[in-house]
Image (cartoon, rainbow, N blue to C red):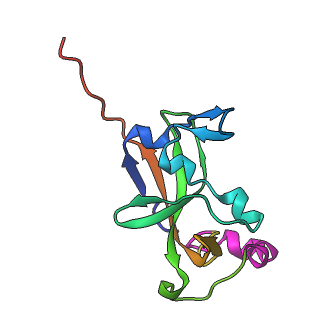
Amino acid sequence: MPAIKINFAPPERFEDGHWCEASQRQRGEGDIVASYSADRIGMGEPVSQPFRWRGALWVSVGGAGDQRERRIQAYRLLPLSLFDGPTRSYASTVADGENARSNPKGFYHGMEVTHGGKCCVLCGEPEYFAPDKTEQLDLF
């Protein structure tokens, strides 16, 4: 089993935001939280806007914890042409659930998704993202 990799990012990237009645949209949401797409993937819809990390695009598929102890699981998002390996749909992954859940590269590795009207692939192993706990100290 591979080691879990945790990346620390500024806390504002994990903000939950608030619902705006006028625009019927979520506002003030951090880009890592806003990339959550597991429900969209399961329904065959395009993934939410990915977030950038270390020059790559990433998509969140879930998380746990409150604002200060949050851990968000994400996979890199690659164009289909850059993925070297077999791909599969969400439906075929679920149909082979036991093997998919024990895949060392993660449940979503190799899964075809849509982003920006193009076919892409989620690439694992998954990494986790958490708010950086470094805080600015008061001068007084």
Instruction: State the count of labels.
Output: 0
Q: Residues in magenta?
A: 90-106
Task: Tell which residue pokes out farthest to the left in this image.
Answer: 139
Instruction: Kindly identify the residue that appears in the image at 51 percent across and 88 percent down.
Output: 81
Name the side, left or right, on which 97 lies relative to 59: right
Residue 103 magenta-highlighted? yes
Name the side, left or right, on which 5 lies relative to 83: left
- Residue 30 vs 124, above or below: the answer is above
Instruction: Kindly identify the residue that appears in the image at 64 percent across and 76 percent down.
Output: 111
Instruction: Kindly identify the residue that appears in the image at 40 percent across and 67 percent down.
Output: 56
Q: Position of residue 120 (x, y in %)?
A: 57, 77
When asked about the image quadrant of residue 115, the answer is: bottom right
Task: Tell which residue pokes out farthest to the top in this image.
Answer: 140
Q: Position of residue 125 (x, y in %)?
A: 51, 69
Residue 58 magenta-highlighted? no
- Residue 98 vs 5, above or below: the answer is below
Viewer-closest of 42 and 117: 117
